[in-house]
């Protein structure tokens, strides 16, 4: 059976409430970012040929690996073998471990991304992708840009927008026409394990958290403001688990860093 396709123009109509208002996300951050756990940041940079921008380091060191354009980022967490209570200090804001030389302006020569797409587009997989799409729109404020259904209403592919960000949502295993299914599972099918978490910028973390909680989201970390010092920024963040076990961070920028050189 050929899948039914809902085209981009016009966008797929959404029966969900009006999306959450969204202002511009902070400079140096994408609207939707992906977090992955790696053993070292240097390895990540060499593998993916990216620049590294360090964030706050408690017992782990976190950083942002940027791919070319500044509107795209992958939040990388490197777990280091440090003793309990070991104190770390910020030694650099930007560290370049790229294997290849970058242009003087720090960017790469890259073509503009296709219309309707972001530079980096995470994909998340669910046992019941159709129900997940409905919940993500109702609870988080995503909007359906594209949805492809196969036999029995199976979600073969979908694209959900949140401001400038885009997330793809699909059935575990990927599209049904693949000879070999993708090695993807819902966290619910593997004991709740997450190998990635998505971070999304919102305007009001508290209001968004209340909306998500009312829709049945399981809030693991309440909205908390963290100030990284005058030279950096202050964010208000909370973490929530969706019905199939994917964990999401929602972040509100409270204060931007001081301009460099002042």
Image (tube, rainbow, N blue to C red):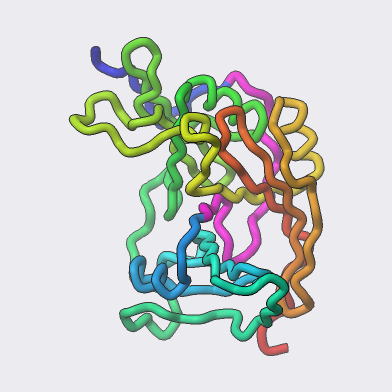
| Quadrant in the picture for the C terminus | bottom right
What residue appears at the point 47 percent right and 34 percent down from the top-left corner?
A: 190
Q: Nearer the viewer, residue 80 or 56?
A: 80
Percent position of residue 72, x then y: 48, 59
Asked whether, in this view, residue 224 is left or right of residue 106, the answer is right
Magenta stretch, main secondary structure, is: loop
Percent position of residue 32, x then y: 55, 50
What residue appears at the point 49 percent right and 58 percent down from the top-left corner?
A: 37
Q: Is residue 59 visible?
A: yes
Residue farthest along the left direction in this orientation? 179
Task: Write down the quadrant of residue 172 in the picture.
Answer: top left
Q: Nearer the viewer, residue 187 or 91?
A: 187
Asked whether, in this view, residue 238 is left or right of residue 42, the answer is right
Percent position of residue 216, x then y: 71, 26
What residue appears at the point 65 percent right and 35 percent down from the top-left corner?
A: 140
Percent position of residue 192, x then y: 55, 37
Say above or below: 139 vs 49: above
Q: Which residues are magenta?
A: 15-35
| Quadrant in the picture for the N terminus | top left
Asked whether, in this view, residue 161 is left or right of residue 107, the answer is right
Residue farthest along the bottom direction in this orientation? 261
């Amino acid at each position: 059976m050929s899948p039914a396709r809902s085209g981009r123009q016009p966008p797929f109509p959404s029966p969900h409430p009006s999306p959450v208002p969204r202002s511009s996300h902070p400079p140096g951050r994408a609207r939707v970012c992906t977090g992955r756990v790696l053993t070292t940041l240097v390895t990540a940079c060499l593998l993916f040929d990216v620049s590294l921008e360090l964030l706050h380091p408690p017992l782990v060191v976190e950083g942002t690996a940027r791919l070319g354009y500044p509107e795209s980022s992958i939040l990388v967490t490197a777990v280091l073998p440090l003793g309990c209570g070991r104190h770390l200090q910020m030694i650099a804001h930007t560290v370049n471990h790229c294997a290849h030389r970058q242009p003087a302006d720090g960017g790469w020569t890259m073509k503009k991304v296709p219309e309707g797409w972001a530079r980096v587009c995470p994909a998340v997989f669910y046992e019941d992708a159709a129900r997940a799409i409905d919940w993500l729109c109702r609870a988080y404020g995503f909007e359906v840009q594209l949805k492809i259904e196969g036999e029995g209403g199976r979600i073969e592919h979908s694209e959900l927008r949140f401001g400038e960000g885009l997330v793809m949502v699909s059935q575990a295993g990927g599209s049904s026409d693949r000879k070999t299914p993708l090695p993807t599972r819902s966290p619910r099918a593997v004991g709740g394990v997450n190998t990635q978490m998505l971070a999304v910028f919102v305007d009001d973390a508290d209001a968004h958290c209340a909306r998500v909680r009312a829709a049945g989201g399981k809030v693991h970390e309440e909205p908390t403001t963290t100030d990284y010092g005058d030279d950096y920024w202050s964010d208000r963040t909370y973490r929530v688990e969706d019905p199939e076990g994917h964990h999401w961070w929602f972040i509100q920028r409270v204060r931007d860093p001081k301009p460099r050189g002042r």
